[in-house]
Image: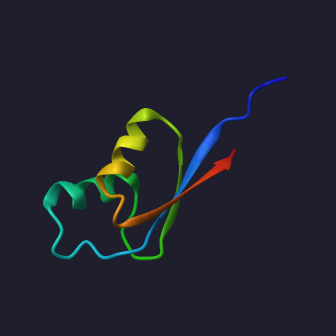
Amino acid sequence: MAAQKKSLQITQTKSVISEKQNQRDTLRSLGLRKIGQTVVREDTPANRGYVRTVAHLVKVEEIDA
C-alpha cells in the first residue's frame, strides 16, 4: 500500500495592506493574491515555513491528495 500524500489547502483571510514586505512576498510565493482565494500546496517543510510566516493572514487545512 502506498502512503497517501498530504497537502495543505491555504486560504487567504486577511488583507496584506499594512503588512511587512516579506509577508507580502510570502503570500505571493504561495500563489495567493486576493482575500478568499484558495490554493493547494504539497505539505513540505518549506511550505510549512511559508505558512508560519503569514499564519495571521491565512487559514490552513490538511487534506489527502
29 versus 12 height, above or below:
above
Q: How many marks?
A: 0
Q: Quadrant of residue 61?
A: bottom right
Spot occupied by residue 47 in the image (x, y as percentages of width and height): 42, 42
Q: Residue drawn 36% across and 58% down?
A: 55
Q: Is residue 6 left or right of residue 33?
A: right
Which quarter of the rendered picture does the C terminus lie within?
top right
5 versus 13 height, above or below:
above
Q: Residue drawn 23% across and 61% down?
A: 24
Q: Residue drawn 40% across and 57% down?
A: 31
Spot occupied by residue 58 in the image (x, y as percentages of width and height): 41, 64
Q: Quadrant of residue 1?
A: top right
The extreme right residue here reads 1
Q: Is residue 1 left or right of residue 24?
A: right
The extreme top residue here reads 1
Spot occupied by residue 43 in the image (x, y as percentages of width and height): 53, 40
43 versus 53 height, above or below:
above
